[in-house]
Amino acid sequence: MWTARGVPSGPAAFGGNGADDRRPSSVRDTLQDAFGALKYLADHPAIDAQRIAILGFSWGAMLSMLALDELAAQRALGAGPRFAAHAGHYPVCSYFIPGATFAPAMDAAWTGAPLQLQVGGQDDYDGADGGASCRKLIEDLPPDKRSHVELIVHPTATHAWEEKIPTAISFRDPRSRSGNVRVSSNAEASAHARITTVAFFKRAFGPLTCRRAQLRLSDRHVAAAELGADHERHGVWRPTSSKKAAPINADVEFRLTPHARPARFL
Protein backbone atom coordinates (compact mmCIF):
# COMPACT_ATOMS: atom_id res chain seq x y z
CA MET A 1 0.00 0.00 0.00
CA TRP A 2 2.83 2.40 0.81
CA THR A 3 5.48 1.18 -1.62
CA ALA A 4 5.55 4.62 -3.27
CA ARG A 5 7.09 5.85 -0.02
CA GLY A 6 9.74 3.16 -0.08
CA VAL A 7 7.89 0.92 2.36
CA PRO A 8 8.34 -2.72 1.29
CA SER A 9 5.36 -4.91 0.54
CA GLY A 10 4.46 -8.08 2.41
CA PRO A 11 5.63 -9.02 5.91
CA ALA A 12 8.70 -6.79 5.64
CA ALA A 13 6.42 -3.75 5.90
CA PHE A 14 5.58 -4.51 9.52
CA GLY A 15 8.88 -6.02 10.57
CA GLY A 16 8.01 -9.61 9.79
CA ASN A 17 11.62 -10.23 8.76
CA GLY A 18 13.00 -9.03 12.09
CA ALA A 19 13.39 -5.41 10.99
CA ASP A 20 11.47 -2.36 12.19
CA ASP A 21 7.80 -1.74 11.42
CA ARG A 22 7.94 0.76 8.56
CA ARG A 23 4.23 1.41 8.15
CA PRO A 24 2.82 4.85 9.00
CA SER A 25 2.21 5.01 12.73
CA SER A 26 -0.82 7.30 12.66
CA VAL A 27 -3.87 7.86 10.47
CA ARG A 28 -2.85 11.49 10.14
CA ASP A 29 0.43 10.37 8.56
CA THR A 30 -1.54 9.01 5.60
CA LEU A 31 -3.44 12.20 4.76
CA GLN A 32 -0.87 12.84 2.04
CA ASP A 33 -1.92 9.57 0.39
CA ALA A 34 -5.56 10.63 0.25
CA PHE A 35 -4.81 14.11 -1.06
CA GLY A 36 -2.26 12.73 -3.51
CA ALA A 37 -4.90 10.37 -4.91
CA LEU A 38 -7.34 13.25 -5.22
CA LYS A 39 -4.85 15.36 -7.15
CA TYR A 40 -3.95 12.47 -9.43
CA LEU A 41 -7.60 11.78 -10.27
CA ALA A 42 -8.51 15.45 -10.64
CA ASP A 43 -5.73 15.89 -13.22
CA HIS A 44 -7.02 12.99 -15.33
CA PRO A 45 -8.84 14.27 -18.46
CA ALA A 46 -11.54 11.59 -18.26
CA ILE A 47 -12.53 12.46 -14.67
CA ASP A 48 -14.67 15.32 -13.43
CA ALA A 49 -12.60 16.91 -10.69
CA GLN A 50 -15.77 18.14 -8.98
CA ARG A 51 -17.10 14.59 -8.56
CA ILE A 52 -14.40 12.76 -6.65
CA ALA A 53 -15.27 11.30 -3.24
CA ILE A 54 -13.41 9.35 -0.59
CA LEU A 55 -14.60 6.14 1.08
CA GLY A 56 -12.59 4.45 3.81
CA PHE A 57 -12.91 1.47 6.14
CA SER A 58 -11.66 1.45 9.75
CA TRP A 59 -8.31 3.30 9.47
CA GLY A 60 -9.48 4.60 6.10
CA ALA A 61 -12.79 5.76 7.60
CA MET A 62 -10.91 7.94 10.05
CA LEU A 63 -8.71 9.16 7.21
CA SER A 64 -11.86 10.16 5.33
CA MET A 65 -12.95 12.18 8.37
CA LEU A 66 -9.56 13.87 8.76
CA ALA A 67 -9.61 14.87 5.09
CA LEU A 68 -12.47 17.24 5.91
CA ASP A 69 -9.92 19.58 7.50
CA GLU A 70 -9.72 22.60 5.18
CA LEU A 71 -6.32 23.71 6.48
CA ALA A 72 -4.86 20.25 5.84
CA ALA A 73 -6.35 20.32 2.34
CA GLN A 74 -4.87 23.75 1.70
CA ARG A 75 -1.42 22.60 2.78
CA ALA A 76 -1.60 19.61 0.44
CA LEU A 77 -3.55 21.03 -2.49
CA GLY A 78 -3.54 24.79 -2.23
CA ALA A 79 -6.67 26.15 -3.85
CA GLY A 80 -6.98 22.96 -5.86
CA PRO A 81 -9.72 20.33 -5.76
CA ARG A 82 -11.51 19.09 -2.66
CA PHE A 83 -13.32 15.83 -2.10
CA ALA A 84 -16.98 16.21 -3.05
CA ALA A 85 -18.08 13.79 -0.33
CA HIS A 86 -16.59 11.76 2.52
CA ALA A 87 -17.79 8.34 3.65
CA GLY A 88 -16.47 6.10 6.37
CA HIS A 89 -17.40 2.58 7.47
CA TYR A 90 -16.68 1.60 11.08
CA PRO A 91 -14.38 4.44 12.16
CA VAL A 92 -13.44 4.66 15.84
CA CYS A 93 -15.57 7.62 16.91
CA SER A 94 -14.09 7.72 20.41
CA TYR A 95 -10.83 8.93 18.84
CA PHE A 96 -12.59 12.14 17.77
CA ILE A 97 -14.37 13.15 20.98
CA PRO A 98 -12.99 16.09 23.04
CA GLY A 99 -9.62 15.30 24.51
CA ALA A 100 -8.96 12.34 22.20
CA THR A 101 -6.29 11.95 19.51
CA PHE A 102 -8.20 13.38 16.57
CA ALA A 103 -10.47 15.83 18.40
CA PRO A 104 -8.72 18.86 16.81
CA ALA A 105 -10.04 17.75 13.41
CA MET A 106 -13.59 18.23 14.66
CA ASP A 107 -12.78 21.78 15.80
CA ALA A 108 -10.96 22.74 12.61
CA ALA A 109 -12.61 24.51 9.68
CA TRP A 110 -14.11 21.94 7.30
CA THR A 111 -14.20 21.96 3.52
CA GLY A 112 -18.01 21.99 3.52
CA ALA A 113 -18.42 18.60 1.85
CA PRO A 114 -20.94 16.13 3.32
CA LEU A 115 -19.88 13.24 5.55
CA GLN A 116 -21.61 9.88 5.93
CA LEU A 117 -20.57 7.53 8.75
CA GLN A 118 -21.72 3.93 9.05
CA VAL A 119 -20.88 2.10 12.27
CA GLY A 120 -21.54 -1.21 13.96
CA GLY A 121 -23.45 -1.23 17.21
CA GLN A 122 -21.23 -4.09 18.40
CA ASP A 123 -17.91 -2.55 17.36
CA ASP A 124 -15.51 -3.26 20.23
CA TYR A 125 -13.26 -0.34 19.33
CA ASP A 126 -16.02 1.92 20.63
CA GLY A 127 -16.95 -0.46 23.43
CA ALA A 128 -19.85 -2.12 21.55
CA ASP A 129 -21.93 0.82 22.75
CA GLY A 130 -24.64 0.60 20.11
CA GLY A 131 -23.31 3.64 18.29
CA ALA A 132 -23.48 5.92 21.32
CA SER A 133 -19.94 7.27 20.84
CA CYS A 134 -20.68 8.25 17.25
CA ARG A 135 -24.04 9.81 18.16
CA LYS A 136 -22.37 11.83 20.90
CA LEU A 137 -19.62 12.93 18.53
CA ILE A 138 -22.16 14.28 16.05
CA GLU A 139 -24.45 15.81 18.66
CA ASP A 140 -21.53 17.84 20.04
CA LEU A 141 -20.69 19.35 16.66
CA PRO A 142 -21.79 22.93 15.98
CA PRO A 143 -24.97 23.15 13.88
CA ASP A 144 -23.16 24.20 10.68
CA LYS A 145 -21.07 21.01 10.77
CA ARG A 146 -23.75 18.71 12.18
CA SER A 147 -25.99 19.51 9.23
CA HIS A 148 -23.37 18.01 6.90
CA VAL A 149 -23.14 14.67 8.72
CA GLU A 150 -25.25 11.54 8.28
CA LEU A 151 -24.90 8.63 10.72
CA ILE A 152 -26.13 5.10 10.05
CA VAL A 153 -25.86 2.52 12.84
CA HIS A 154 -26.07 -1.20 12.12
CA PRO A 155 -27.12 -2.47 15.58
CA THR A 156 -25.88 -6.07 15.33
CA ALA A 157 -22.74 -5.42 13.28
CA THR A 158 -19.20 -5.74 14.62
CA HIS A 159 -16.10 -4.06 13.30
CA ALA A 160 -15.31 -5.03 9.68
CA TRP A 161 -18.79 -6.46 9.13
CA GLU A 162 -18.31 -6.93 5.38
CA GLU A 163 -15.50 -9.48 5.81
CA LYS A 164 -16.63 -12.76 4.26
CA ILE A 165 -15.45 -15.20 6.90
CA PRO A 166 -17.18 -18.51 7.69
CA THR A 167 -17.11 -18.03 11.47
CA ALA A 168 -16.66 -15.11 13.82
CA ILE A 169 -13.14 -14.34 15.00
CA SER A 170 -11.59 -12.15 17.66
CA PHE A 171 -8.15 -10.70 18.23
CA ARG A 172 -6.31 -8.67 20.80
CA ASP A 173 -5.77 -4.97 20.18
CA PRO A 174 -4.89 -2.56 22.99
CA ARG A 175 -6.55 0.26 21.09
CA SER A 176 -9.92 -1.38 21.68
CA ARG A 177 -11.73 -0.32 24.84
CA SER A 178 -11.88 -3.91 26.04
CA GLY A 179 -8.57 -4.94 24.50
CA ASN A 180 -10.40 -7.47 22.37
CA VAL A 181 -12.00 -7.03 18.92
CA ARG A 182 -14.66 -9.30 17.46
CA VAL A 183 -15.22 -9.56 13.71
CA SER A 184 -18.26 -11.28 12.28
CA SER A 185 -19.58 -11.33 8.72
CA ASN A 186 -22.91 -9.53 8.41
CA ALA A 187 -24.49 -9.80 4.96
CA GLU A 188 -27.47 -7.60 5.84
CA ALA A 189 -25.31 -4.74 7.08
CA SER A 190 -23.00 -5.13 4.09
CA ALA A 191 -25.84 -4.91 1.58
CA HIS A 192 -27.44 -1.94 3.31
CA ALA A 193 -24.10 -0.14 3.58
CA ARG A 194 -23.44 -0.54 -0.14
CA ILE A 195 -26.87 0.78 -1.11
CA THR A 196 -26.78 3.77 1.23
CA THR A 197 -23.22 4.69 0.33
CA VAL A 198 -24.00 4.73 -3.39
CA ALA A 199 -27.13 6.81 -2.73
CA PHE A 200 -25.08 9.25 -0.63
CA PHE A 201 -22.51 9.73 -3.38
CA LYS A 202 -25.22 10.20 -6.00
CA ARG A 203 -26.78 12.98 -3.93
CA ALA A 204 -23.41 14.61 -3.39
CA PHE A 205 -22.41 14.45 -7.06
CA GLY A 206 -25.73 15.61 -8.44
CA PRO A 207 -26.89 14.72 -11.96
CA LEU A 208 -24.13 13.79 -14.36
CA THR A 209 -24.50 16.04 -17.41
CA CYS A 210 -22.29 17.19 -20.21
CA ARG A 211 -22.69 19.12 -23.43
CA ARG A 212 -20.38 17.10 -25.59
CA ALA A 213 -18.74 13.71 -25.25
CA GLN A 214 -16.31 11.91 -27.50
CA LEU A 215 -15.86 8.13 -27.45
CA ARG A 216 -13.43 6.19 -29.62
CA LEU A 217 -15.28 3.40 -31.46
CA SER A 218 -12.37 2.08 -33.51
CA ASP A 219 -9.25 3.29 -35.26
CA ARG A 220 -11.42 4.72 -38.04
CA HIS A 221 -14.51 6.01 -36.30
CA VAL A 222 -15.00 8.61 -33.60
CA ALA A 223 -18.49 9.28 -32.36
CA ALA A 224 -19.44 12.71 -31.17
CA ALA A 225 -22.54 13.27 -29.12
CA GLU A 226 -24.55 16.16 -27.84
CA LEU A 227 -25.89 14.90 -24.52
CA GLY A 228 -28.72 16.17 -22.38
CA ALA A 229 -29.12 13.17 -20.14
CA ASP A 230 -27.74 12.29 -16.76
CA HIS A 231 -26.38 8.86 -15.87
CA GLU A 232 -29.84 7.58 -14.92
CA ARG A 233 -31.42 8.46 -18.28
CA HIS A 234 -30.95 7.47 -21.90
CA GLY A 235 -29.40 9.58 -24.62
CA VAL A 236 -29.55 9.03 -28.35
CA TRP A 237 -26.67 10.00 -30.58
CA ARG A 238 -25.69 9.58 -34.20
CA PRO A 239 -22.13 8.40 -34.82
CA THR A 240 -20.20 9.98 -37.67
CA SER A 241 -17.08 8.85 -39.46
CA SER A 242 -13.81 10.71 -38.93
CA LYS A 243 -12.46 9.31 -42.23
CA LYS A 244 -13.91 8.41 -45.59
CA ALA A 245 -15.39 5.14 -44.48
CA ALA A 246 -18.82 3.69 -45.05
CA PRO A 247 -21.38 6.08 -43.52
CA ILE A 248 -23.19 5.04 -40.38
CA ASN A 249 -26.86 5.98 -40.65
CA ALA A 250 -28.52 4.31 -37.70
CA ASP A 251 -29.11 6.12 -34.45
CA VAL A 252 -27.54 4.33 -31.51
CA GLU A 253 -29.05 4.34 -28.05
CA PHE A 254 -26.71 3.97 -25.12
CA ARG A 255 -26.84 4.10 -21.35
CA LEU A 256 -24.10 5.85 -19.42
CA THR A 257 -23.46 3.93 -16.21
CA PRO A 258 -20.77 4.13 -13.54
CA HIS A 259 -19.34 0.86 -14.92
CA ALA A 260 -19.05 2.04 -18.50
CA ARG A 261 -15.68 2.95 -19.99
CA PRO A 262 -15.47 6.69 -19.28
CA ALA A 263 -16.00 9.16 -22.05
CA ARG A 264 -13.56 11.99 -22.60
CA PHE A 265 -15.56 15.14 -21.91
CA LEU A 266 -14.60 18.13 -23.99
Image (cartoon, rainbow, N blue to C red):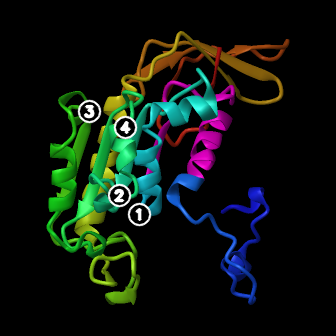
What is the spatial separation of the Cα atoms under label 4 and label 1, in whole angstroms? 19 Å
Looking at the rendered structure, the kind of residue marked 4 is Phe
Is 73 within the magenta? no
Task: For mark 4, give the secondary structure.
Answer: helix
Does any portion of residue 265 appear in the rendered image? yes
The reply to whether dot 2 and dot 3 touch (C-beta < 8 Å) is no
State which quadrant residue 219 falls in: top right
Quadrant including the N terminus? bottom right
Task: For mark 1, give the secondary structure.
Answer: loop
What is the spatial separation of the Cα atoms under label 2 and label 3, in whole angstroms? 19 Å
Q: Residues within 10 Å of mark 3 (few under 14, many from 20)?
A: some
Looking at the rendered structure, the kind of residue marked 1 is Ser
- Left or right: where 129 falls relative to 22: left
Name the residue that disc number 1 marks.
58
**Reading the chain from its start, which is encountered first: label 2 or label 3?**
2
- Left or right: where 208 falls relative to 246: left
Span highlighted in magenta in the image: 30-56
**Reading the chain from its start, which is encountered first: label 4 or label 1?**
1
Q: Residue at (78%, 17%) from the top-left corner?
A: 246
**Reading the chain from its start, which is encountered first: label 4 or label 3?**
3
State which quadrant residue 114 falls in: top left
Quadrant including the C terminus? top right
Name the residue that disc number 4 marks.
201
Name the residue that disc number 2 marks.
89
Depth check, mark 4 against mark 1: the one in front is: 1
Is 41 within the magenta? yes
Name the residue that disc number 3 marks.
145
The reply to whether dot 4 and dot 1 touch (C-beta < 8 Å) is no
**Reading the chain from its start, which is encountered first: label 2 or label 4?**
2
